[in-house]
Structures are given as structure tokens and as C-alpha cells.
Image (tube, grey):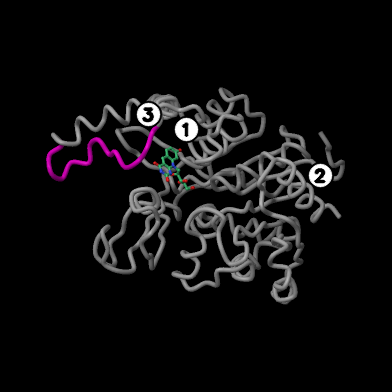
Amino acid sequence: MVVDSKINSVVVLAGGVGAARFLRGLALVHDKQATTALVNTGDDTILHGLNISPDIDTVIYTLGEAIDAQRGWGLSDETWRAMESLKRYVDVRPTGSIAAPEWFNLGDKDLATHFYRTARRSEGADASQITSEIARAWKVAQRIVPMTNSDVSTVVELAQDCQAGKAGTQISFQEYFVKYQHSIAVRAIYFQGAETAKPNCINELNQADVIVIAPSNPIVSIGPIRALAGVDEVLTANRDKVVAISPIIGGHALKGPADRMLTELGHESSALGVARLYKNITSTLIIDTVDADLKDAIEREGMRCIVTNTVMSGQKISGELAQTTLDSIAR
Ligand code: FO1
């Protein structure tokens, strides 16, 4: 392990897959005990009465070397017997009942995590405590912290009439993402509960040597964290040590709906569009080599721009990206 002597604590603002891969790379070049991931929980949902935290679990399973690499979510070597058994109840479910939601796939091994989280919540434990217990169970040495201990829900407003409802209907993020495979147009995103929710890690952000905005969806992964009272102010005050990695490469997201969502919400789906969203809170933006021609335009927005390979197709590249990210602040 290489430990950069100038850098002690690193806080990473994190969504799901892209952030998890970045954190795995960071573990190769920076002390895990001095790394905190502040993770989006706007995607959290309750199904079958179970509390499910997809981004938290994606980060923990990835760092615990247990993620299903191909799907990017859930556990490897998973079985689906509970989901198969659920189908029996779909036919008897009364109209209007949301019991037996078979559109959201919960693997048999993954279910144990949701059982544990739900049981601990009913005992009164808060999200931070439960998350640290789950991380410990997976032998994850980094601090994994939910963005807040309060319930904040990302809600998506439909732009047009579609199978999910009429234009203007609001649906949960997981319905948008999983049930409708993010194939429906959106016209607004809300983070319900964010105004009154207390963010975690404000002190850690102020004290961090480097704050990384992971290559996650700027609207629905980083957006909920920024929507919590005081977070943008802390990032702005610490802008010199904030570095972001663009999740948009050649105008497209590697996974998920970030590119379409940016366009639908009036932003440019490019690394320059990402720069404009982050310019008040970020001093440095890292973009992929395919976007090298955007460097000058990004720097005209008032940020430094570093061009490198950001496609984390393997651990070596993730480690190199993490090193470049730390070096960009510690130079
Ligand atoms: N994503 C899917 O596309 N389909 C699923 O059925 C699905 C189930 C699932 C279960 C547990 C979990 O932690 C994540 C799951 N995801 C699934 C991924 C997840 O909902 C999204 O990738 C994130 O919310 C977006 O970051």
C-alpha cells in the first residue's frame, strides 16, 4: 500500500457502482482507516417491510469483495429461491395491494442484510450505527456512513404520460430505476425530507485533506447529499480540496440514466455539463481522455481540469485513477 504522507483523511461523496469501484481503487493507494465514504441514501426503499439501502450495500459488498461484478449490485453466487416463491402470491394479491413486489430482485443471501438492517432499526439503532455494523460484518475497514440518519427519499416526476402514470405523477426512485428500467422521461427530481434532515460527517468534511466527488450520477446520487442543509456550504468553503470525477464520458454514462437525466433536466450531457453543476463546490474536475477537447472549456468555468483514463475496467486502473485524484489536491 502506498500512503501519501501529505494526505491523511479522505472523504468520498458516493453513489453506487462508480463510487464503489473508485473506493476499491482508493484502497490500493490510501489508508483504508483514513477513508470515509459518505453515501447517498435517497435511493433507499422499503419493500416486503424490509429497509433496503442499495448504494450503501453496493459500496459495502464491493469493498467486501462480495459484489456480483456483472450486475454491479447484489451478491455474487446468489440464488433467487425467495423471489421465485413470491410468484405464488402475485395471483392472489388483491387489486391495489403492493404486497409481493416481484419487480425488485432480492437474492437469498442479500435478504439477510435487509433482515438485519430492518431488525436493528426496529430495535431503535440509527442508520450510521447499523451501516457500521454491516460494514464490520463484511470486514470493510473504511468508514461507510449514510449521508443522514433521517429518511430522505428521491422522487421522480414524469415528463409525459407513460406506463408509469400521467405526466406530473411522482414515483419513487426505485420504481423509476428498476420497475421502469429508467426508460421514462423525467421533468423534475425531489429529495423529500432533505431540508430538515441533519447531514452526517460535516466535521469530517471540514477536517478532510481531500474531498472526492465520486464518478456517480450528479443529479440522483450526489444531488441528495448536496440537498442536505449545510453540505453545499461546507463544500464551497473547502472548495480548494474538493476534486470531482466526471461520470459522463464521451457524452454518455457508463451505466444508468445520468446522461438522459441531465438532458431532460436542462443540463448538457457532457463533462462540461458536469463541470457547470460542480463549479461552485469543486476546484478540480477529472475527465476521461476521450473528452480531452473539453479541457479548455472546463477551465474557463474556473476549475482545474485533469485528463486521464477514468474507465475503471479493472482494479489497476481504479488504483491509478485514485492516485491521480489524490495527487490533484496534494500537488
Ligand atoms: N437494480 C436493478 O436494475 N434491478 C433489480 O432488481 C435490483 C435489485 C436490487 C436489490 C438490492 C440492491 O441493493 C440493489 C438492487 N438494484 C437493482 C440496484 C439498485 O437499485 C440501483 O442500482 C441503485 O439504486 C442506483 O444506484
Q: Does the magenta segment cover residue 95?
A: yes
- Residue named by callout 1: 126
Q: Does the magenta segment cover residue 63?
A: no
Judge the density around disc 1: few (<14), some (14-19), many (≥20) Cα neighbours within 10 Å: some
Instruction: Name the disc covering residue 218, or none.
Output: none
Q: How many marks?
A: 3
Magenta highlight: main SS? loop
How far, Cα to Cα, is label 3 from label 1? Answer: 29 Å
Task: Point out the tag, 2 or 1, that comes first from the N-terminus.
Answer: 2
Q: Hey, which quadrant is residue 79 in on the image?
A: top left
Q: Quadrant of the C terminus?
A: bottom right
Instruction: Name the disc covering residue 80, or none.
Output: 3
How far, Cα to Cα, is label 2 from label 1? Answer: 30 Å
Identify which residue is drawn at 79% across, 52% down.
324
Residue 98: image location, x then y, percent = 22, 41
- Residue named by callout 2: 7
How far, Cα to Cα, is label 2 from label 3? Answer: 43 Å
Part of the protein shown in magenta: 93-106
